[in-house]
Amino acid sequence: MATVIHRDTFEVRRSVNTPDYGDEWIVQEPPGGPKRHWQVEGNAITTMNATGQAAADAEHLADRKEDRKEELEADHMECLEHCYPANRREALALLLTEAMVTGNIERTAYINRVVIWAKEGRVDLYEKQDAVEAATTINGVDNIQLDLDTWIADDPAVSVRTAEGING
């Protein structure tokens, strides 16, 4: 029984019967270090030199940054959707437009509270995404969090029904 490593995916399988594995598998123990530092040289998996490792680490950090920014945006949108589902946001947008066209200042001011609240959430999101972009380590990227609890606590709780009832 031996260990094999897939030459394209670097999947490691231990205690296998090597005749069951074709040319896409290399019979050897893993070289150590993260898989992003591995490379295929002939019929062996080796560790990249320092330059190759640095390039792989830079690519890994860039990929993690993009993933983290998307995660933050998804968290923000999930929170927004929870507080103001799409149908409610659409209704409020229509009511705001109507209020502005008809000069209903009271309704405009009431609905504008949620507009300001949503903008504050986006500003925080953008600041955190910028911080992710500026981070220089994976831990730095992963430690950046949105303060959604504070944002939710500041929700002005604007309702469509109340907005519809404001005729001033």
Image (spheres, helix red, strand yellow):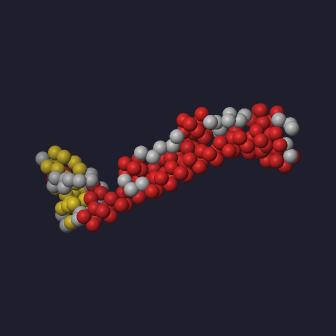
Quadrant of the rendered image containing residue 25 = bottom left
Q: Position of residue 51 (x, y in %)?
A: 27, 66
For the C terminus, give its image quadrant.
top right
Nearest to the observer: residue 17 or residue 155 = 155
Q: Position of residue 85 (x, y in %)?
A: 65, 39
Q: Is residue 158 above or below residue 57?
A: above
Residue at 56 percent of width and 47 percent of height:
124
In the visual, does 116 lie left or right of 95? left
Q: Examine the rendering and report whether any part of residue 111 can be seen.
A: yes
In the visual, does 63 lie left or right of 161? left
Nearest to the observer: residue 11 or residue 79 = 79
Q: Position of residue 62 (x, y in %)?
A: 41, 58
Q: Position of residue 84 (x, y in %)?
A: 65, 38
In the visual, does 127 lie left or right of 105? left
Nearest to the observer: residue 155 or residue 71 = 155
Residue at 86 percent of width and 37 percent of height:
167
In the visual, does 128 lie left or right of 20? right
Q: Is residue 115 above or below residue 35?
A: above
